[in-house]
Amino acid sequence: MRILSSLRTFLDFLLRRSQVEEEMEQEFCVHLRSRADDLERQGLSRPEAERQARVEFGGHQRYKEECREALGTRLFGELIADIRYGLRQLRRNPGFTAVAIVTLALGIGVNTSVFSFLDAVVLRPLAIPDASQVVVVHRGDASRLPYPNYVDYRDRSQAFAALAATFPTEANLGFNGESKLITAEAVSANYDEVMRIPLVLGHWFTDEDRPVAVISYRAWVSQFHTDPKVLGKQVRSISTWYMVVGVTPRDFTGVFAPRPTDLWVPLRFWAKQFPTSSIEEELRDPSSRTVMIFGRLRGGVTALQAAANLNGINTQIREQAPKSTRTPLSVSPVRGVSDIEMRAQLLPVIALFAAVAALVLLIACVNLGNLLLARGSVRQRELAMRLALGAGRTRVVRQLMTETFLLALIGGLGGLVLGAWTDRLLEGLRPAMPIPVSLRLSMDFRVVTFALMVSLATMLLFGLLPAWRSTRSDVYPTLKGETAPLQHSRLCRASLVAQMAISLLLLLCAGLFLQSILRLRSVNPGFAVRNRLYAWTFVSPPEFTRETGREFYTQAVERLRSLPGVRNAGVTHFLPLLFDEGSDCVSNGVGATLHAAHGTIGPGFLETMKIPVLEGRDFSSADLPNGPSVVIVNETLAQRLWPRQSAVGHRILVGCQKPETAEVVGIARDSKELSLSEGPRPYFYRSFNQNYTGLATIVVQATGSPLAMAETVRRTLLQVSKGVEIYALDTMAYHVEQSYWQTRWIASLLVIFGVLALMLAAVGLFGVIAYWANQQTHEIGIRMALGAQKVDVLGMVIGEGLKLTLIGVATGMAGGLALTRFLSSLLYGVTPTDPVTFVVVSAILTGVAILASYIPARRAASVDPMVALRYE
């Protein structure tokens, strides 16, 4: 009961503080009046009795403090008072408050946004029930494993409640005459046993031999307009029609992030639509890495135990198939990007952004520390008065830390707003690709907690030292105006030098990536880009057979060539710099076997792209589908296989498992195929007629603006056949620009961070120089009284800022020489110690520092000498 009574009293104080205080005052007055009545009955007059009662009771505030302490509310009351006083102080100094809050919001906002990126890639669990029990099976950095191994693991493992396989792939989703390029998952029938997804509509399929499908919530909205009768309708993917049996919830986007899945179909039925391809063969091949494997752990089983169980099964598989790999299996929780290979590619970028964001936050915090130090120096007399009146140093420090806490809290909230805006910026800078890519950056619980923790750490690390130093000065000299803020000035200067060095590092990173982009833009890709237009198309069975599909592309190319304003046209499977069609084993039958990348092109493609055939001939209509296989090799492959002799007319063996013979009919000049940053590598072209694929790209060479021909090209293709699906229609210049989007994306963010760091450093320099000039007012007055001109004062103040800046630049350059080498793997055509970048960035930082120092220098030079001589 006593505990409940104390709790009730505390809550009353918390919720009805003014009423409780009034009741305490009334109770004291009752006691005082009662004692005065007693004294009056003893013969004293009423005024004398009241005076004597007050003397006997003493200061009633002391009794109030004792009551608050007895109630356990004293500390809470002091905290409320500190908060109110802190808010008044911040309101009283709007300039200081605004600069401090904006500085913190920028630093915390950048870090919050980078943490959102990290959360989306590494931390965020799948939007499914009991997501912590779902794991992905992988071998090292390889996310895909052989399908036959999956069957063995599923049938033999005792550690999993269920194991499911998925084959993420690019496909199309067609309905009601419209088709979109999407990411699809061909999954095993027990996929739902692992994911346990509560569907919005319908149910999950449990049979892999029926043409049924589950669509995403996004597809339901975009293509079916949230039709509640979507179940039972037919959608088409590749050449097969599927009946929709379910719709996933909004938050579930599959397991192939950052590509959201829009369609789930049965794995075995999906593979049957490729009778002439190697997909079914890959599903049977125990050495082919085809599927991703996900499992739901049994209750009480850990990931390590599950991995040990699978590796035991793997040992039995190796005994039956000695050629199986001996790399052990691993089991990892499914968080963020579940594709281990893709996550490994993203982690270096995240590490770079995290380091840059941490440096921005450090600059912001140093700025805050300088502001607090300067403000503490201005308030020295006020703090000394408090100490002289009996306040303890701990009590004063607590008051100052409360003000810092308020700044950190408001700055943290501002950082969350800025972080949300930066998330939208990050998503907006992603490439506009035919197949959507999205990391879904969001302000979830983990991100908000991170922002608040950063705010708290900022308060403790960079607020405690200024608060402690503000109470260390001697009280009596301070009250007499004999303050000597030299130590504060030294600390501010040292922190400013650190700011300049860090800012230089960030600008160096941004400059190096900008240099990389300039080098990439100047790279000769080995093919023509100007006045070229491409159309990414697809014709699918059963409307198109292999014969009618080949005929469509032949007619389409001929019809396009005959259009006014078109010089040439050609067809290829994939454009250069878009996808890697893979590599294959090649040999001349005598020497060692090489691995060479390859592509598929039709007659006239090389001429359209201005890739010259150096020897031999181009493909032609005479290269019949059932005729002798022919290939065109590039210079590098020709020199590797037949050094010092012509490759034309020779036979080449293509294939690792079952090599096939092909005749080399031409040698083409080397060109960039996978990326602009790649060096010469072996490459060969297959004939489109002999290696037909329904998914192909038509390239058109226009005489004028290619965009002006876009609608004409679209109409022409539809006139040849209304069954063609056009997924993308754009210029080759845009395509080449998008090929290095990652470098451009990194550079854009680093430039933003670098400019932000430069602004913060400039603000910090302005504050320190203004504070230093203010402390030198008396000296400046003496100098001007003795004949110094305004230009001399300008030079003195700007020189002080320039001196600190040059020290910071020298420190930053030394650090840059040591640290930028870690960026070498992300750069192209520029060394991490590029002297041009170092000189330009140093000049920019120095110029900004001079501008930041000029304003306080001009203000100092305009001081009246007589006023300055009287300055205290």
Image (spheres, helix red, strand yellow):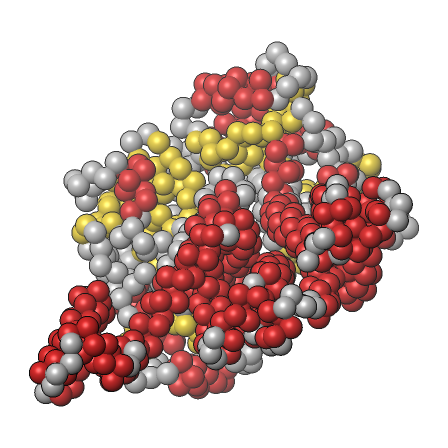
- On the picture, is 835 further left or further right than 241? right
Residue 23 left/right relative to 221: left
Frontmost residue, 97 versus 179: 97
Q: Position of residue 809 (x, y in %)?
A: 79, 57
User: Does any portion of residue 11 appear in the rendered image?
Assistant: no
* x 90%, y 50%: residue: 644
Residue 156 position within the rendered picture, expressed as x and y whole percent measured from the top left: 34, 81
Is the residue 490 above or below the residue 506 in the image? Answer: below
Left or right of 416, for residue 466: right
Please state which of residues 634 and 854 is positioned toward the viewer in this rendering: 854
Q: Is residue 467 above or below residue 318?
A: above
Identify which residue is drawn at 20% across, 41% down. 230
- Between 336 and 269, the residue placed more toward the observer is 336
For image coordinates 16% across by 40% down, the residue present is 229
Q: Position of residue 855 (x, y in %)?
A: 71, 43
| The C terminus, quarter of image | bottom right
* Front in this rendered view, residue 47 or 669: 47
**Residue furthest to the top:** 564
Question: Where residue 141 sits in the image (x, y, percent)?
Answer: 55, 69
- Look at the picture and state if 557 lies above or below 606: above
Count every numbered label the image shows and give the total.
0
Pick the quarter of the image with the N terminus: bottom left
Q: Residue at x 28, y 40 (%)?
A: 221
Asked whether the viewer can see residue 644, the reply is yes
